Image (cartoon, rainbow, N blue to C red):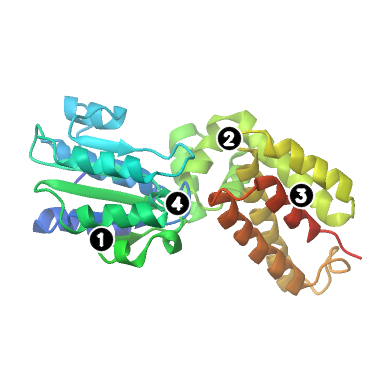
Amino acid sequence: MVHNWDIVGHQQQLLGLEKDLRDGNVAHAYLFSGPKQSGKFRVARAFAGILQCPNGFCGVCKDCRAVLAGTHPDTLFVKDEGESIKIDEVRELIRKTHLTRQGKVRVILIENVERMPPEAQNSFLKTLEEPPEGTLFLLTTNHIDQVLLTVQSRVRHIPFSTVDDAVLRQYLVKEFGERPEMDEAIVMAQGRPGLAITLIREPVAFDRHKALYNQIETFLKRNDLVQKFQFVEAIEQEDGEVELFLDSLTRYLRKLVFEYMKMPRHALTGRFSLEDLVNLFEFLEKSRYLIDRNVNRKLVLENLMLLTEKN
């Protein structure tokens, strides 16, 4: 690598971006898609730093420090704060792209562009088709299917996937040294470096993930709809708890499917068939979609819990 990306994995994607830089073939807009916390936003920010830094993202000059701090005058960050991006916000963003820039390029970095409803994406489309000279867009998305095809057709799409556990472990050992909880944190992270780092750095987060995982195991072993609905009411009121629960349930269902396919008899086969697990997983993904679209979270989660009740 020519540049110091400081990224875990994603070598193919980084080599492709370096080739664009080397060949003078940088697109006016990129869309980085892939799982949450897989590293795509970090790559986008590093790419912005490379474009702004006279030394290729050295990490120490004023431009690099400003990009990393989110204060660079020619680098506009639209971070994901959990809210949808309204059409008025898009219009204000478009207005800012026409302001005089201080350097040779203005970079607009939008985290999770799918937060724009369709009408906002359509409003953004004209600027994406014909951006002001010297303006470059770096977009990320956790859900490529929620990005309009017309938007996708105006960008250079770079897909990201999860990172191999061995690569992730090598990075974590280098950064934090050997930890007793490291292997379990890697399993919890499911190939997502951002989550793995959080679990190692924050013991409270690690303990909460583990507790939710154990709670799910209890829920699937027996019928107790009252307890399940009480659980939903508790997590629905806490920031971040619903997302943690859905992550833990995803991980547990993947483990179960793998075990069902490997074992002739499993402790839960008396309650759930493999088809039941697949249906539950599909409804889980549908639940994520509905929650992302601001459908009543409590109602969505209660419907999900109903599928864990068996006669």
Helix, strand or loop for disc 2: loop
Residue highlighted by disc 3: 216
Circle 2 packing at 10 Å, graded few (<14), some (14-19), many (20+), is few
188 sits left or right of 77 in the view: right
Q: Earlier in the sequence, mark 3 or mark 4?
A: 4
Residue highlighted by disc 2: 179
Helix, strand or loop for disc 1: loop
Q: Amino acid at mark 2?
A: Arg
Residue highlighted by disc 1: 155
At x 69%, y 60%, the residue is 253
Q: Amino acid at mark 4?
A: Val
* Residue 264: x %, y % from top left: 81, 74
At x 45%, y 50%, the residue is 38
Q: Earlier in the sequence, mark 2 or mark 3?
A: 2
Q: Earlier in the sequence, mark 4 or mark 2?
A: 4
Helix, strand or loop for disc 3: helix
Circle 1 packing at 10 Å, graded few (<14), some (14-19), many (20+), is some
Residue highlighted by disc 4: 167
Q: Earlier in the sequence, mark 1 or mark 4?
A: 1
Circle 4 packing at 10 Å, graded few (<14), some (14-19), many (20+), is few
Q: CA distance from mark 1 to mark 3?
A: 40 Å
Q: Answer with the quarter of the image where residue 47 lies.
A: top left
Are circles 1 and 3 on residues that touch, CB within 8 Å?
A: no
